[in-house]
Image: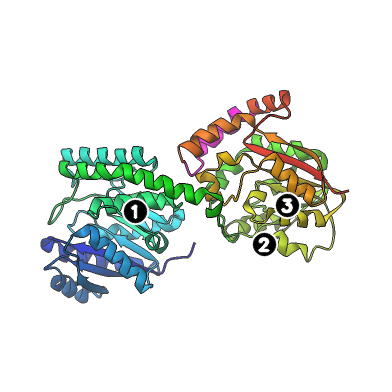
Amino acid sequence: MKAPRTATVVLPTYGVQDAIASVIRDLAVAAYALRARGIELDVLLLDGGGHAETATQVAAELGLPLKSVPGPISGPGEAYLEGFRRVVKAGGADLVVTLDANGRHDPTEIPSLIDHLIQRGSHVVIGSRWTSGSGTPGLSPSRWLLGRMANLTFRWVTGSPRIGDATTSFRVARIEPIRDLNLGGTPLDSYSVHTTFVAKAIAQGYRVGEAPIIYRPSIAGGGGLTVGDIGEFASHLFALRREMQRVRQRRLSPAGRAFHVDHFGAEDDLECLAASKHFFDWVLEEFEPYLHGRVLEVGAGTGTITRRLVERYSDVSVVALEPADNMFASLDAYAALTQRVSARKETLVDYEAQAGNAFDAVLYVNVLEHIAEDEREVRLAAEVLRPGGALLVFGPALERLYSELDHKAGHYRRYSLRHLRLIVEGAGLRVVSLRYFDLLGVLPYLIVYRWLHHGQISGSTMWGYDRLIVPVSRLVQHALPHPPAGKNIILVALKE
């Protein structure tokens, strides 16, 4: 992701005259800290009346860039949207920051939220009152309970299990989800704007995370949900759920799948998968008779399979192709340690034109599904194979399992036996073996990633799967070599 260089604070001010000077001073402190990080901060203040003069004066004294415009009469909800529209139209901000102007949110915590966003590769980071490390001295017991209930309801109704605090306004967002925000007919109160923004960002596939904050007592004005707010809040959640489902379905449909090869979007998941020793050993054992001599590994990532090839097969040399910037550095570092691996930052389309020698095998492990033109890719693979060489493909199966995790990883499809056979035979190769793989993995994948919409792999989940499910699934596969379905698909085809 692009490193941010500019951030704009959208700050609606309604009835917070007693707090505005303190908030602006704290924003100036945040701006100073961000300047040391190479990020310039400015403020867009939407004045609901009586705040502009004080804010402008304090900002000028402290050297904080601040622009004040009249806020909508309708209140903070519309003011946030007006601020977003102005920031997008101006076109200068990489990040947009929002927070309450009543003093409950500490502006000096903005740099830590931005650090979290950059380190985690997120699109949105919420300053959460409920995540580990947070504190809520500004909440009475009744408001603490109401806030918790509201956010638990949001998680349950919208199917967003990883979001603990959707109602707060304290957050940092990259400009992309701000630009894509369309509230449609959503009622424009402050809470509905913030919850709808989070829900739609998730449904659109943006990465939304949370970081701890201290929620302070207010200096002026209100803050926090009331019993009356709960009724309004609840009334729009079910409509929001339907809208999320509509947006998610459109994005996950084949027409909504468009990805970039220069950045891999599921780097953290790849780290979890790399620890799946039993699973990848199983896959390579299936390919073992064909892994010798010169092997071309397409989409080698950080080198997880490359290492296993070098360690397991002493007669193998590997040309490893990987186009993604955030993957190639690790692969290239490993290749520098052994003469048996040559790492190239390119796709097969680029490499094929310079290939001087044919390969004994071309290997795709969880890669072919990332390639938009898979028919063309398979034809290119066939061209670089020597006569008798093998095309080895392992990837996700069953389109009905396509999930948030697939989209995040950049999968254009999940394969069926028919589709994979069609494109391989169309490239002039003879299919030796083609079958579904890992029957027992279907149901867990369906529940966790398709039905529950989990968008990432946890280390504990992968540990349990690799050590408990995989050994049993291997036994099932041995008893049923050609299962009727499977989480994955595996193919061996020869060039004659």
Q: Are marks 1 and 3 in contact (CB under 8 Å)?
A: no
Q: Which residue is mark 2?
A: 345
Which residue carries the number 3 mark? 297
* Residue 415 covered by magenta stretch: no
Residue sitting nearer the eye, 283 or 201: 201
Residue 465: percent from the left, percent from the top? Answer: 57, 32
Please state the total of marks drawn on the protein image: 3
User: Would residue 431 be found to the left or right of residue 412 on screen?
Assistant: right
Q: Is residue 456 magenta?
A: yes
Q: Secondary structure at mark 1?
A: helix
Say which label, 1 or 3, has the lower sequence index. Answer: 1
Label 1, label 2: how many angstroms apart (C-alpha)?
37 Å
Crowding at dot 3, Cα within 10 Å, few <14 / some 14-19 / many 20+, comes out as: many
Question: What amino acid is at disc 3?
Answer: Glu
| Residue 219 against residue 269 in the figure, above or below | below
Image: magenta residue range:
454-471
Amino acid carrying label 2: it is Lys
- The secondary structure type at the circle numbered 3 is strand
Q: Which residue is mark 1?
A: 197
Local crowd size for mark 2, using a 10 Å CA cut-off: few (<14), some (14–19), many (≥20):
many
